[in-house]
Image (cartoon, coloured by chain):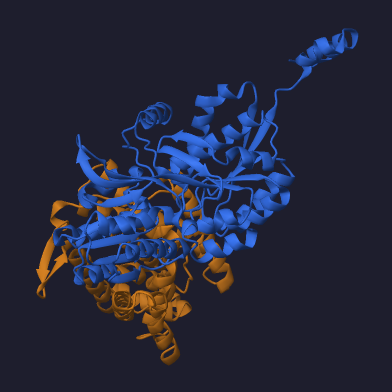
Amino acid sequence: MILFVLAVGLSITMGLMGVINLAHGAFAMAGGYLAVVLINRLAVPYVPALLLAVALVAVLSVPFERILYARIYGRGELDQVLMTIGLTLMSMAAATYLFGPGPVTLKLPEALDGTVPALGREFPSYRAFIVGVGAAVFAALWFSFERTVLGAKIRAAVDNRAMAEAAGINTARLFTLTFALGCGLAALGGALAVNVVGLTPRFAIQYLVVVLAVVAVGGLGTIGGTMAAALVIGVADVAARYFFPGASAFLIYAPLLLVMLLRPRGLLGKL
Amino acid sequence: MNANQTRSTNFLCGMAAFLLCAPLLAQPLTVKVGVVLPFSGPGGDTVEREEQAMRLYMKLHGKELGGIRIELIKRDSKEPSGATTRELVRELIFRDNVDILLAGQFSPDAIAAAPVVTQAKKLLILVNAQASFITHLSPYIVRVSAASWQIAYPMGRYAIEKLGCKKTVVGFIDYAPGRDVLAAFKSGYEKAGGTLADAIPMGGPTAVPDFTPYLRRIRDQSPDCMYVFTPGGPFTLALARTYHELRMAETGVKFLGTGDATQDSILAQYGAQALGWMSGGQYTADLDTPENKKFLAAWQAEYGRDSIPDYFTVHGYDAMAAAFHVIKTLNGKIDADKAVAALKGWKHNSPRGPIWIDPATRDVVQNIYVQKVVKKNGRYGIEVLDTILAVKDPCKELAIGQCAAAAGKTK
């Protein structure tokens, strides 16, 4: 589920806007560190801190989009990769400077620190919380993209930008908004991941590969596809780690390979 | 002394008898010590403390050198592949003319630097690099840190002989040091008459995994002991978190690890999650010896009460102590062969207890402490349960694998 939250933001920026955004992990990391600062230093309660971190990263991403990303929309893939990976490296250095190279931790509220019974087994309640958040994000995104005017406009702008502009849609503003949404979701994933895999300045790049795999398997720009892919890869990964821990480093790429061979556009891809 | 004064001194010297003036002109003897460590790499905070420890040792013991000055030349080897270290070591030797090298955080660093120091005839004191066979790679390598077998092998025996483990599962991060620790622990465990129930590779060292499936696999086999090796820092932190989430402690399994699992500097971040964890390691800041108390007091006076040294820190401290011993013995005129000879059999009262360099292998001999995470006086700390005295690297003692093969090559 954490995979879904991390990946869906990237699926939006990459799939809908056509930007190869390798700085996605950097925005996720920013969300993680912001949550840590808010909770540990400013003593903001957990859930408001999470929302605040998401909002802040979304707002902060706007100048990035306006100043940097807006210039590379039409450029080639190499330019996009170079710029965004550069941003990632800069963000890692900045995080090291601000927070040190060591890991930081985040204290969970009591309610999320226990276990809940489900399906006859005890589950850590934090994991249950992440599943809940993932489901909520999925529902909200699906609804707003498929059932609202804004969603329709975004889809229109992606399909044919010139036509959408001719129809009176301000696509520049729309793209800024979409980008902010993607980055906000990245921040949410980053903040949630702190208590699963921890947070260091290397976070920005450590999980990029698996997140990219999820986006690729799911198909660019489809929320349902990303969800399905996150579930497939997540479950396959955990099962492989449990049953064949020696081979798990390779097995995670098996579904990727399979889907790419059979459906090169991803599970539900149409772009 | 400004230029004018220098000139007039020179003039006076010309006039007066040479012998009278020579001491005025003589520069203090300077020994150049090159430090190559991955300051900006993963685990940079630990590496930074190693350097802080070196500087602290210089500050506390500088007077003992009797006027010989040490110039520390620091280089950042950035990443653990060894390639950068090799280049930097070469540069320090041939361009900066260093006399002694302190390097080797990761084993590949030391392995890559070994042929360079052999050719150039320079003393290399290993700051960390724990793969056992490294000391065989060059006659100019001396290790003051530790060998992975030294840590894990005795714990394998201890698990059966003292802790009464009957069914034990090992989890390790799947890279060379992890496989080394596994082999050593397994060897000790089998020596004491046991067989490991399972050995679980827990992913590679590049990214911290979600430990849930691995710990589940351990839990579902209901062993009475588990032995875990991961690098310290983000890995152990995530491990503690998942260990707590899965309520592993309540299953009654005894958690054993290397010193990395109970690194002093991270205990406060674990909180209650790792209470009761046991480990076998070479140092803890809570060691109750006069030598360690003195070291701790000096450390916290210099770097503040929040800074906690761990075993890496003490490796750095002792590496500088070894360099001092060489400089003192050779009166500042460093020759690699004589330096290695001076270090062979060198005995030192380290904060981690008495250590000495085995003349046969140039490797450190030290105590291994069985440690337990406890809460005392409102903070999390380490209680030393037991001490395994004067452990020599068992890999070389038993001539296992690369340790034996490498030994044969250099003989």
Q: Quadrant of residue B333?
A: top right
Residue A38 x/y as whole percent: 28, 46
Residue under the image location 50 percent in, 25 percent down: B60
Work out whether residue B128 can be spotted. Answer: yes
Q: Is residue B331 above or below residue B273?
A: above
A226 or B300: nearer the viewer? B300
Q: Is residue B286 above or below residue B26?
A: below
Residue A36 x/y as whole percent: 30, 49
| Callout count | 0
Residue under the image location 64 percent in, 39 percent down: B339
Residue B11 x/y as whole percent: 87, 11
Left or right: residue A216 versus residue B114 is: left
Q: Quadrant of residue B382?
A: top left
Quadrant including the C terminus of chain B: bottom right
Q: Which lettered chain is shown in blue?
A: B
What shade does chain A have? orange
Q: Quadrant of residue A183?
A: bottom left
